[in-house]
Image (cartoon, rainbow, N blue to C red):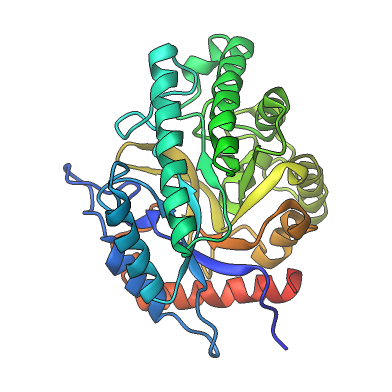
Amino acid sequence: MANTYPKLHNAMWPGLVGKGDEEGQEPPIGLEKMLDLTATAEVDGVKYDGIDYFLFLPHTNPEASDDELRAIADMIQAKGFSVGSLVAPVWPGTVGDSAMGDDAAQEKFLSAVSMACRIAGVFNQHGVREYGVIRIDSAEFGIEKWREDPKANTSRIADTFREAAKIAADHGERLAAEGEICWAGMHSWKDMLDLLEEVGLPETVGFQADLAHTYLYLLGYNAPEHALVKEGYSDDEFYAAYEQMTDKLRPWTIDFHVAQNDGEVHGAGAHDKTGKHCPADDPNGKLDIVKCAGYWLKDAKARGIEHICWDGCMFPNAMLEDAKTWKTILAKMIEVREAHGS
């Protein structure tokens, strides 16, 4: 009998992140279109179980009324999906601001977390959402400002995260900090670990691991002093380093993204360059997706992980709108579940 744990989700934010109406940008892809593309995918009778969801326009107004949110939940459920993890709109230009900023910026960041928790509550009460976390990051693009005073800036981010944790705990939610090289204070595996330990609230604030982003952690892309492998590494060197990194971060990991990376960085629109997400079958992909996923998913259920999500952030629209993309990804996610699930 095929495994049914963990549940398989597709992310909705690839239709938004890096998209826009400025010169050179591709237009956003609407929520219903993203849902339909996800619903079409099927492999040997298996379909996606749900979606992970970015709480900002044009998919969602974070200030939407409860009735408006329930209507969105009805639409998602009607497509055959549940909702898992939610992405709080913590960045400047959305609701929030830098977690490393002054008191006004911190207040904006916390407001975004409060909005996300409110929406989570509506979805939970509706029944469309029964598991998942709320995803955050430092909302400080790039690391140059952080480098001016790393210790003080990490402490400021940690203080903001602790305040956010109080809000989340009051709503029965957990926060997952996304490890990605573009987020100040979270841009290497060591800096990420230092931040989580300084926050010191593992029951409420954990780590969201993404295969594409954490691959660049290994290379020390934005922190050469923390590199665990050098270009030209052997398989033995890679997996020894991978085990070292995952042993440190896995105990904190409460949300997980399946992805592929070709060793390059990519940015689009306002999104700073970070690990390039590639199609699941990209011939230039550096990762054995199924094998690498196993390092993160060991004892996943004990950490409260009920689902995994594919992240195709900043895929071109033509790729997002191709049904083959989502079928190929689904097939790879099924492989991950068969190898590491139950």
Vertical side of 215 occupied by 310: above or below: below
Residue 52 x %, y %: 47, 58
In the image, taking residue 336 as reference, residue 183 lies left or right, namely left
Who's the residue at 43% across and 76% down the image?
Answer: 80
In the image, taking residue 27 as reference, residue 102 lies left or right, namely right
Who's the residue at 25% across and 54% down the image?
Answer: 28
Q: How many marks?
A: 0
Vertical side of 195 occupied by 132: above or below: below
From this viewpoint, is residue 65 visible? yes
Vertical side of 227 occupied by 86: above or below: below
Quadrant of the rendering where the N terminus is positioned: bottom right
From this viewpoint, is residue 225 visible? no
In the image, taking residue 295 as reference, residue 22 lies left or right, namely left
Residue 236 x %, y %: 83, 54
Residue 288 x %, y %: 67, 64
Vertical side of 215 occupied by 47: above or below: below
Who's the residue at 42% across and 52% down the image?
Answer: 122
Q: Residue 15, located in which quarter of the rendered image? A: bottom left
Q: Nearer the viewer, residue 94 or 249?
A: 94
Q: Nearer the viewer, residue 237 or 80?
A: 80
